Amino acid sequence: MIRPMRTAFAALLALALGLGGAAAVMAQNGPPRIVIEPGVIEPMPIAVPTFIDEGGAGDYAREISRVVISDLEGTGFFRTIGEEAHISRVTGFDAPVAFEDWKAINAQVLVTGAVSVSGDRISVKFRAYDVFNGQVLEGAALQFAGTTQGWRRMAHKVADVVYSKITGEGGYFDSRVVFVSESGPKNARLKRLAVMDYDGANVAYLTDSSSIVLAPRFSPTGDRILYTSYESGFPRITLMDVGTLSRQSLDEQPGTMTFAPRFSPDGNTVVFSLERGGNSDIYALSLSSGQLTQLTNAPSIETAPSFSPDGSQIVFESDRTGVPQIYVMPASGGEGTRISGGAGRYGTPVWSPRGDYIAFTKQNEGRFHIGVMRTDGSEERLLTASFLDEGPTWAPNGRVLMFTRETSGAGGQATLWSVDITGRNLKQIPTDGPASDPAWSPLLP
Amino acid sequence: MSLAAKSLLLIAVLGLAACNNPDRYGAGGPGGAGGPGGAGAGGIDTTGLGDPNNPTSIAYFNQRVGDRVLFAVDQSTLSPEARTVLTAQAQWLLQNPGYAAIIEGHADEQGTREYNLALGARRAAAVQNFLISQGIPANRLRTISYGKERPIEVCSTEACYSQNRRSVTVLSAGAGV
């Protein structure tokens, strides 16, 4: 039974992640999938009974179960069947499972788990079953251990495995997001760097709000953050160590401004814009040797560079035609090839970690959109529309985007939103106050 | 010491403070940047800017000469009106060599954050180049871009956007920056 179920779900997912168009047959990263037609996705019913307390776990077992459910339901692909509807109780992690009882309530997947705590150590084990054949999903029986402080990560890891086994996509729940926490009125906004779990939990502040900070980016290993800071009085790209919070300005040429930094996939190079005499071009700075290389040389604005995941190309934004558009150039620099072609203004291109799409901000007819396109500019798809949506960042699995949405007027405020690459599952990320400029970390180690 | 001399000293002290950190929005915290302020004040506290009737005061420069010029959407081209204001700024700066200036470039909110930073820099540079062409030594002028981070007007219509697409020439005492 596992095959048909997975195939059915794969078709469902292909539809969800699919690229529009009816009855298209596509080859994308593997065997062809049949895209039947665009439409509403019926979430898969699953059961996640509260994990068993195997000693000292107290509230952790219930809270971990809650986070697993929140992660899975948050994707829009799953619907958990409430415990009040469960016929069977899971009395022990290794007790026989009454699959007929789970079939009777139409659960397609059952996730059971157990939690034990000793001192500040926590251990979580789980199994995800295909209810219809009574078998554990291949690879979905694991155990994680860590500190009680990191209990949410244990839950995210469980959910990542379940999500990954059923969708065939990589997980993304065990990740962090660095962003700008905002306060104060629109004409005197205070901004400080903050970091949180992907779902808005566990917020920590990395700077105070004594100077403007903009657009942070994680390193490929999540241990460092690049951002633009006015701490010196002028905009400068700054490198912060996440562990120690120590920070340094990366470029100190007087009379210039540096901004829009991003790491290369190997973490050894920073690409950014350097403005001199009013003209912004893209440069690369080697973090090991300190060598600065100019990659573009044009009188127009060249900014927002982002590496392809193999490090061979850079996508960026230029207004050389008079309107901002998206271009791709070799990582060694050059004029680049324009890939955006539609009406409107295109900016903030970001290459997917999977390499298959480029996400961007589009401004057209007074509205802003988050969109994705193939790396050659084809198959452009706008996912959102509002007064002001900007600055997409990719989830580690390349299937979900987070971005800034700002409302209009004197009381306008920024909030964080996520959407999947089909445009489904648009939702706000809970934050304590206004927030902007999210950047997703890789999956945590 | 005369009252006028004391006033000048006060201006000099404030000017030096501004020189240490040209980000007049960030360094002062919410108090320093609060409120939209008067037409010529650019949102900063006007205390210590001198008497606007005194032609050598910063207040006079801000209000009578005009400390700002406006730009069209996405443009950094100087309009005839802007050139008139900047010509007067240059004359004032030539007559008052004890002042340096930081030229701020700003954008409206209709654009992405990073593009607007670059656009603000382009506007500030256009003003700087014009002032240099009028004989102001380059070492008296610096530029900074705020992109869309510091609107002066907060509505979301063209009436406000047109005021936010601006450069502001912010004076400080001292011969160079």
Image: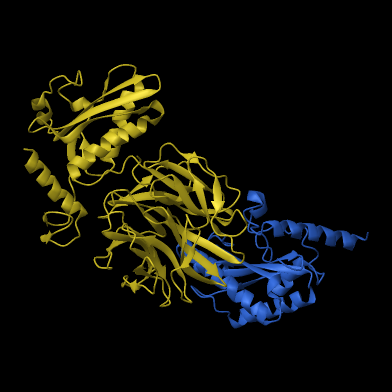
Chain colours: A yellow, B blue
x%, y% of residue A409? 49, 58
Q: In the image as oriented, which residue stretches furthest toward the top?
A: A55
Q: Residue furthest right?
A: B1
Q: Position of residue B94 (x, y in %)?
A: 76, 77
How many marks the image carries: the answer is 0
Q: Where does the N terminus of chain A fall, quadrant-wise?
A: top left
Closest to the observer: A243 or A428?
A243
Placement of A109 over or under A307, stated as above or below: above
User: On the image, which quarter does residue A315 sit in?
Assistant: bottom left
Q: Residue at x 32, y 70 (%)?
A: A340
Q: Nearer the viewer, residue A119 or B41?
A: A119
Tell me where residue A49 appears, x and y as whole percent. Answer: 22, 26
Horizontal placement of A269 versus A425: left or right?
A: right
Where does residue B65 sit, x and y in percent of width and height? Answer: 72, 74
Looking at the rendering, which quadrant does residue B163 occupy?
bottom right
> Visible in this render: residue A358?
yes
The reply, left or right, for residue A407 in relation to residue B138 is: left
* Residue drawn 20% across the image and 59% down it: A19
User: For this rendering, which residue is in front, A314 or A50?
Assistant: A314
Kindly tell me whether residue A35 is visible in this rendering: no
Q: Quadrant of residue B80?
A: bottom right
- Vertically, is B101 above or below A128? below
Image quadrant in which the C terminus of chain A is located: top left
As drawn, is A423 to the left or to the right of B58?
left
Q: Is residue A231 above or below residue A99?
A: below
